[in-house]
């Protein structure tokens, strides 16, 4: 028979401390265990130990959109595979450089 460290009364006490805002390390120190045992127990009892992390939301981009750099001596061409490549301007094909 295996004896488990986390009895129901210890889980109830840890749940109360968790809701009070104590960290897993502080709870572990009070019970004489390690931080990872508290974290693992909280994962096994997810309904009683809600996550403390906020959901991640990407920050909105500030400022105007970045304009691509235009080089008058280069042109963008589309290859047969559909890739866009930047190549030197050929005056006989592309005409004179734009000011």
Image (spheres, rainbow, N blue to C red):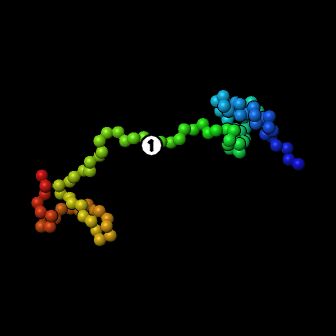
Residue 80 position, x and y percent, is 29, 71
Residue 29 in view of the camera: no
Picture quadrant where residue 45 is located: top right
User: Image quarter for residue 38?
Assistant: top right
90, above or below 62, in the image: below
Task: Specify whether 91 is left or right of 4.
Answer: left
Q: Farthest bottom residue?
A: 80
Name the residue: 76% across, 36% down: 11
Q: Position of residue 86 (x, y in %)?
A: 26, 60
- Front in this rendered view, residue 91 or 78: 78
Residue 97 seen by the camera: yes
* Residue 67 against residue 77 in the figure, above or below: above
Q: Nearer the viewer, residue 42 or 69?
A: 42
**Viewer-closest of 15 and 39:** 15
Q: Residue furthest front?
A: 47
Residue at the far right in the pictured view: 1
Indicate the position of residue 84 as horizontal and vertical percent values.
Answer: 29, 62
Q: Which residue is tagged 1?
A: 58
Residue drawn at x 67%, y 38% as measured from the top left: 49
Name the image quarter holding residue 21: top right
Query: In the visual, does 85 lie left or right of 28?
Result: left
For mark 1, give the secondary structure: loop
The reply, left or right, for residue 19 in relation to residue 76 is right
Locate residue 72, reporting x and y percent. 17, 55
The residue under the point 22% across, 52% down is 70
Q: Residue at 14%, 67% (x, y): give it.
A: 93
Tell me the crowding category of disc 1: few under 14, some 14 to 19, or many 20 or more residues within 10 angstroms, Cα based.
few
């Amino acid at each position: 028979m295996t004896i488990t460290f986390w009895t129901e009364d210890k889980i109830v006490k840890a749940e109360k401390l968790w809701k009070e805002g104590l960290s897993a390390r502080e709870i572990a120190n009070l019970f004489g265990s390690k931080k990872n045992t508290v974290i693992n127990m909280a994962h096994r009892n997810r309904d009683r130990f809600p996550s403390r992390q906020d959901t991640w939301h990407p920050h909105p981009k500030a400022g105007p959109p970045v304009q691509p750099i235009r080089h008058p001596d280069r042109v963008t061409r589309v290859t047969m595979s559909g890739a866009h490549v930047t190549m030197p301007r050929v005056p006989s094909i592309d005409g004179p450089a734009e000011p």
